[in-house]
Structure formats: C-alpha cells, structure tokens
Amino acid sequence: MSDGMVLDRVSRSYRGGAGVREASLVVRPGEIHALVGLNGAGKSTLMKLLLGMLRPDSGAALIGGVDVRRADSRTWSRLGQLVETPLAYGELTVRANLSVAAQLRGVPSAERSMVIDKAVEAFRLTEYVNRRTRSLSLGNRQRLGIAAALQHEPDFVVLDEPTNALDPAGTILLREAVARLAGQGAAVLISSHHLDEVARIADTITVMNAGRLIGHLDPQDDDLERAFFQSVLRDDESRSEDGEQSA
Amino acid sequence: MNARHRFAIAVTVEGRKLRAARVPVVTALLFVAGVTAICMSVTIAVTNGSAELVTKLGPLVAEGGWAGYLSSATQVVGAGGFIACGVVLSWSFGREFAEGTITGLFALPVGRAMIAAAKLVVFFAWAIAVSALSTAAIILGGLAAGLGSPGAESFASLGRVFVLIVLTALMAVPAAWVATLSRGLLGGIAATIALVASAQVLVISGAGAWYPPAAPALWAMDPASVDGAALALSSFFPLLFAVLTLLAWRHLQLDRA
C-alpha cells in the first residue's frame, strides 16, 4: 500500500467569502478518519478538493502520492467515493447501476458479476436487485450508492455524510464495510455533521468549523458530543474576539 | 486499461442509460408519429383543396402527390427534428447536474471528457435510428395516404429527409454545451429553441444557407440553394460545439450550488 490521502495547506474560496482556508489533513493507509463539523463548515468543499471536483486556489491534494490534478486512470481506479448524491440512475435496476459503477471503476468484465453479487449481499440489496432504482426508498438508494462506491474494494475511500437517509441497519452495514476496508489497508475519509455511529469507530476525528480544521477529538472520549460542541463554540468565540479586536 | 478500452466502457454505459430511459424513447416515438401524422394531414388537406394551408406551405406542397407530401415532410422534419434532438441532448447532459449524479462522474478512471464524447456518440446513434424510423414511417404514411409507389425523384427526396435528420442532430450539439454551462436541462432546451427561431428568421431574410442550423433544411428542400462553401462552414459548427462541450466537461468544477 502506498501513501494515503493528503491535503496540504489547501485553500479555496467561493464568491461571498465561504470556502476552505489553509486546510492540511493526512489520512493514512488503514486509518478511518472522520471529519466532523456543523452544516456549512466546509466538509463537502474539502472532499471535493480532494477528489478534483474543485481546484484549490492554493495548496495541493494528493491521493497515493499523486497530485489529483495529474492523477491517472490507475490512481482513480483505486478510489471509491460518494459525495452528496449516489451514482444511481433511476431508469436502471439496482444490478445495472452496480454494473455501471463497476465498469466505470475499471473492474474487469470477468470479475464484475462476482463483485456485484458480493456487494448485493454485503448491503442486503438482494430483494431489490432487479427493481428500477427510481422505485427505491431514499435509504435504499443511499445503500446502493455506498455499495457502488465500495464494491471494487478501493484503497482510498471518501464518503461525504454517508449515513444521511440510512436506517440503523444500513448504518451498521456501512460501518462494517468501512471497518473491513480499513482492516485491509484502505485510507478512509468520512464526514458527518453529527457524531454518528460511523464517526465513533474512527481512529482519528478532526473537527472543522467555518472553513478551517480546528483540532481533533479523542475517539475514546466518553462524551464526544460535548467535546465537539465545546470545540466549535471555542472556535466561534475566538474568531468573534479576533473580529472585534481588528474592528 | 487503455484509452480505447475506457472509451468503449463510456459508450457502453451511456448506451445502457439511453436505452433504459423514457425521455429518448418517448421523444423518438413522438417525433416519428408526429411527423408522419402532420404530413398525412397536410396531404389530405391539400387533396381536399385547403387554399390557406397551401399558401402557407408553398407551391411545392400544392402540387400534391409524393413531391408535395415530401416537401411538407422536409419542412416538418427540419424544425421538429431540431427540437427532438435538442431535448435528448439537453436531457443526456443536463440530467447529470439536475439529478446530482455528476459528483459520481468525478474521480473515475474513465475521464469526464471521454464520458461527454460517449454521450455525443450515443446521441448520434440514436439520431440515426430515429432518422431511419422516420423515413420508413414517412414512406408508409405516403402509401397509406394513397400516393402510390414513390418514383426515383421521390426516393432522392426521401434520402435527403434521412440525411436532414442526421445533419439536424449535428446542428443541435450546442444544446449539450449550454446544458453543461447552465448545469441543467432547461438551458439546453432554451438554446435549442433559440437556434430554431434564429434559423427561421435567417431563412426568411435570405441568409439561411450561411447559417449552419438552417443550412441542412434548405439543402434538403433544394440542394442547389446551399453551395459548397456554406456546407463546409456548416460542418465546422457541430465540431466547434462538440469540442467546447468536451472542454467544458474536462475542466468542470462543482463550484455552484
């Protein structure tokens, strides 16, 4: 396994001032790294920068030691991601969507059927496998999206708020899949706006607030929620004091 | 996985999406049935002596028979084909943004420019199939309207109708570019309507042959009305917008809400 995923002093601002400022983050092989922050903290922007969906104003994003601006098909074939919306087309069946995702990830045709069967079983999609995706509930559609992102057993995993719309059973399946991939050496970055079940199994928890990475939480902390809110509150107060002083 | 293999994957995936979706199938059926129904109605109206319709559609339609029938088919196909092709292109490119699936098309071994090229290839294959179906339906419509067997000249006109739909598909490519820039379907459809309307205006003004979106229909109506230089200019038009679309997909950033 080569290097994991790295964000090196990455900045990117949107019109209106929001964005990410000087963010540095390392997700090592075999590590589950949770990124937590309130809505609008910049988590999705950070993940988009890592995946080449946004180009940084400054800094660099690297996957497996390769700058994402120059990443080739071999690098991308080792990555699985789900940001915002699952790659699931309503007109295709669950199986066809998994097949499309496997093809686009470069899974060889000889292995495709086996890979899809395993994903269907791992994410308990058997009863929906021949149903058109548009008829699925939001939760099952999300389950399909996660299966599509992880079925090829990637070395690098980026999941943006994957527990959105998932029921408890789906959350447990996701947690098991993520833990298994990390156990095989995958670098996993997973975001959440609350300390959900997946964030709680992370090896590292980084807190993001107002576009900046403001510190870490101890995954062993008995009261993670309190520690998280205190961390965000402290940062908000400190920025507000800085603002008053400069004014 | 080499570039050829990746492109083959992109074409397979886009073909699968297009075949399974309702929009391309419904658009094709509406177009084929609509063109045939309108042409048959016009022929029947001309046979019954509708002077007002004859004045609007021109002297060729007034001749009746296969010549009149195919003249009305060419006029209907010219405008209707543009709308049908624009709708399918706008859907193919704009849906990825409207449905949010565009995020899943990043960070893949198959690049986005390759996916955009595959979308264009699959769309073009759809247009050829629609063109073949429409031409067949027009022939059947003519036979059903009691026009008898078409002569050699009518077959030449039918050939031009087939080519017209294929060329119209090429001239509709700006819809893909605008759908990409506007991040949705409606921009592409608006661009299609703008192209059709501007083509109509330029045809009326007499400069239509030099306006690529209008040139195929003018050529199909009267091949001598569009000279070689104008046709050459027309061939650059879809090429330019195909390149612009591929570049837009290659450099795409998800920087808008």
Image (spheres, rainbow, N blue to C red):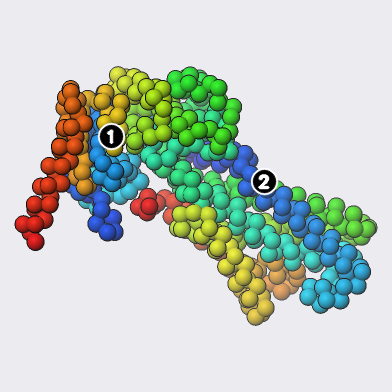
- Nearer mark to the viewer, of 1 and 2: 1
Question: Is residue A76 shown above or below A245?
Answer: above
**Is residue A5 visible to the viewer in this orientation of the structure?**
no
User: Circle 1 is placed at which residue position?
Assistant: A194
Nearer-the-camera pick, A131 or B132: A131
Residue A103 is situated, as x and y percent measured from the top left of the image, at: 50, 32
Residue depicted at 32% across the width and 30% down the height: A156
> Mark 1 falls on what kind of element?
loop
- Horizontal side of B231 relative to A81 (left or right) equals right
Q: Quadrant where the N terminus of chain A lies?
A: top left
**Is residue A137 visible to the viewer in this orientation of the structure?**
yes
Residue depicted at 17% across the width and 41% down the height: A232
Q: Quadrant of residue B146?
A: bottom right
**Callouts 1 and 2 in the same chain:** no
Q: Chain of mark 1?
A: A
User: Circle 2 is placed at which residue position?
Assistant: B25
